Amino acid sequence: MTPVLVESGCVAALLAAAAIAIALGRFRAGSPVLYAATLAISLVAGGQAFLVLLAGGAVSDLLLPLGLPGVGARLRLDALSAFFLVVINLAGAAASLYALGYGRHEAAPSRVLPFFPAFLAGMNLVTLAADAFTFLLAWEFMSLSSWALVTAHHGDDRNIRAGYVYLLMASAGTLCLLLAFGLLGGGGLSFDAIRAGQPGGVVLVAAIILALIGTGSKAGLVPLHVWLPLAHPAAPSHVSALLSGAMTKVAVYGFIRIVFDLIHAPASWTAMVVVAAGGITAAIGMLYALMQSDLKRLLAYSTVENIGIIFAGLGLALAFQANGMDWAAALALTAALFHAFNHAVFKSLLFFGVGAVLTATGERSMDRLGGLIHRMPATAVFVLIGCAAIAALPPLNGFVSEWLTFQAILVSPQLPQWGLKFLIPAVGALLAFSAALTATCFVKAFGVTFLGRPRTPAAETANETDGFSLAAMGILSALCFIAGILPGLVIDLLAPVTQSLVGRSMPVQHALPWLSLVPVAERSSSYNGIILLAFLILAGALTAMVIHRVATRATRRVPMWDGGYPQTLPATQYAGSSFVQPIRRVFGSSVFILRETVDMPRPGDVRAGTFRIKMIDPAWRFAYGPIGRLVRIGAARLNRLQFLTIRAYLTLVFGALIVLLVMVAAWR
Amino acid sequence: MAMTSSMLAWWPDLLAQLVQMLLVLVIAPLVLGITRKVKARALRRIGAPVLQPYRDLWKLMHKEAVLAHNASWLYRVAPYFVFAAIWVAAALVPTYATGLLFSWSADLIAIVALLASARFALALAGMDVGTAFGGIGSSREMLIASLAEPAMLLVVFTVALVAGTTQLSAVAIHMVEEPVGLRVSLALALFAFVVIALAENARIPIDNPATHLELTMVHEAMVLEYSGRHLAMIEAAAALKLVLYFSLLICLFGPFGMATGAQTFKALALGLGVYLAKILVLAVALPVGETTIAKMRVFRYPVFLGGAFAAGALAVFLLFVSKSF
């Protein structure tokens, strides 16, 4: 059996599981059976893709007699697909394992069960598709099945609104991709034909822009990110993890497939657009993540930031490729792909953690939590690892990919174009800025949720989550460590991918002494996570041991001190919004459209004082608001057309026909 | 370099590494003692003896640790982690010689990130007991970090672009052996670095290390609940961090005298002497500078640190335009 056959078999199995799940939803045992099945299928699909990548990314093809007549459905498994299949199925397997426990709390399983495997199948199929029709079909299938999952809890009005916005954004994105493939596919719809027949000039420019908008709206590039913070909180937590950890990666895959593979003539202006979009997305995403109190919204905005980092890396790769610096392009592309993998791992982990908190307390807002490290010790440890990894702290994995991105920025002064020379340092500064803010953001998220004293009875009486959920989080935490201290292994796995896309891969890493990471040359930079970790453990343990031996290890438990005037009310602790108040104030006027209203009762008045913060995402005010108003005005005007006479309609149809014929004649 | 050298050639580098680890540990309280003494003299006080920090640490270590009832494991582990992370970072910055065995295991970006790890742990520990002071300290510490760390990364970029490397030992060798000369970019980076170093070490004008009013503290408010050996670890880490920033300043902007070539005994001894002399100069200059300025309000920080960010960004811009700036 060829690898592509195995992968398509897995897709078929997932689709079959979706069909069976419609019946399974009625039974109590249906949920664990289904998630066990998706876990097994994801492991097979991911394992097969991993083997392909390990063996160097050999290409295998499959032509199915489905789809458009005469074209059929072409499927192909190459190195790029294999890498993204690993990422998607890793996230899928982890989500399935998690859902074995988490799914038991689902109130209406029949609204989730059939769509979960369908969603996985859609994502897998996108990466396998080798013709535009199959690609778009799979893409739309993925969008619609995830939409069904977002609106699974449709009792809440906010979820309905989230689903509506998501559906609109997804449709608009698919439309852009459809047009992009329309422009590219002059010679035929299969990817081979598109590669062979390249349009030039304005058509190519339009195709690239459309592809960027189409994939960017799925990935969450600013200002196309507005659906993420709405849709991610609406979905059940294991689905949020997939939306954020896997589906945004499918969007990244789509972008890489179109821009690096199908259009293999990179131009420096493309690179500039992508780098700038990445840098701005990273900074804006993180600033907004900082301001959130809803944990899932915070994670959704943080996904926007990470997508920014990934796209910045991709843009750098395009810039280097356009100038023939293959080795640097391989470095930047590796950084971007590595970050995509890392983000799938730690963001899934964090969504699982939030899901566990949600199950235990019924709360998503960190301002109503606190002290969970005592009630949910294992979850706290795993979430802490996830927070440290996403904050790019060594020796975890997030640091390595950001480090590689910075290394790519440091070789970019060699680029000849002035536009890039001015842009890249600015983007470097934006990335540095967002990296620093990320640490603050996750200190806040972990500190307010898990540390301190419980702010509500729900947080005070929370119980540790189930074993399956913990196992899923534990495995992902372990991966954060492994990819962080042995980054060379991941980079070597990525070698066939970069080889096939930019014709070069980073130097082989696993053979280096001490398992170090040396991206360019030994003189210019190197990093070794194992030694760093060993050093940290050794230094910390040694110090603790010496002090315990030589000095004392006596401890005494007392009430907290707090400068001598301890306040026993839990509300006197710093909460999420107070923690970031300084940053809100620093950036309030320039970045956020912020309104703080303080209602302080006069002395003698006994009503409660209030403090409200209202923030509007500028994307809503400046982009979507005007668009929405235009649509409404346009609809009101066009409404008159619904009440015409038969004669008027006939005239309209005839007029339209004449106009079209004239246009066709003029075009010829 | 060390990474590819054979088994036999290790031991001098290993020795240099161990000496470095002990050196920074031993001199850190002394450096703090000198800055305090100089500051006291500048304020016309007599001040505590320069060896007082050692005595303080010794005393704190032998006291029992007093923990709040709801302090978690994180609160107890954090001081050791913070100390270890800063110690490791300080051990990887070349001070008197470049031939450290493990200096290649973390470059300048990794050292900045290690410090960020330490800060992450300490800020979390500040929130662990759930007091208002811990929260205000953590919040402000992270505000300062959010503004200082990007500026620091821009300084790193500047130095890396001038020297063509982010490896500290290679940077030091480049600065000593190549005719680097006076550069606009390095001057801007130096300015940014000094501002960042003041902020990161909780010195005036950002924070006051000697204040006893909780509301005016940042760093001290964050660790207000700590006592005994845990506090000793945090104090030692703070002292080490000061030495680390002094060493970084020396390594990046004035590594002359460092043993960069063959690591002979004479070169090493000379390097050590020059390093200690430079540390002494900085330890005197810091408090003298501090006594001439006043502490800032919290919401002036963004202007001050934004200046550092702007200087760093300008330096990087200039280097992207031309390598010769």
Image (cartoon, rainbow, N blue to C red):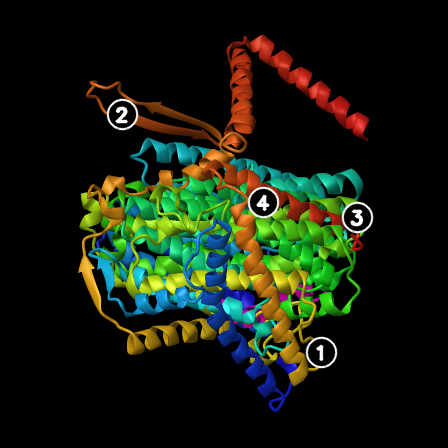
Q: Are marks 1 and 4 on the same chain?
A: no
Callout 1 touching callout 4 (CB < 8 Å): no
Residue at x-position 53% and y-position 28% = A624
Residue to which mark 4 is pinned:
A215
Q: Is residue B130 visible?
A: yes
Q: Secondary structure at mark 1?
A: loop
Image quarter (top left, top right, bottom left or bottom right) of the C terminus of chain A: top right
Question: Residue B24's spot in the image, x, y percent?
Answer: 51, 70
Q: Give the magenta part as a residue range.
A: A483-505
Q: Is residue A302 above or below residue A88?
A: above
Q: Secondary structure at mark 3?
A: loop
Q: Nearer the viewer, mark 3 or mark 1?
A: 1
Instruction: Return the chain for callout 4.
Output: A
Q: Nearer the viewer, mark 3 or mark 4?
A: 3
Under mark 4, the amino acid is: Thr
Q: Are marks 1 and 2 on the same chain?
A: no
Residue to which mark 1 is pinned:
B261
CA gap, disc 3 and disc 4: 26 Å
Residue to which mark 2 is pinned:
A609
Q: Earlier in the sequence, mark 3 or mark 4?
A: 4
CA gap, disc 3 and disc 2: 57 Å
Task: Tell me the quarter of the picture where residue B59 sits.
Answer: bottom left
CA gap, disc 1 and disc 2: 69 Å
Question: Residue A380's spot in the image, x, y percent?
Answer: 31, 58
Q: Are marks 4 and 2 on the same chain?
A: yes
Q: Is residue A57 visible?
A: no
Q: Nearer the viewer, mark 1 or mark 4?
A: 1
Q: Earlier in the sequence, mark 4 or mark 2?
A: 4
Task: Tell me the quarter of the picture where residue A345 sits.
Answer: bottom left
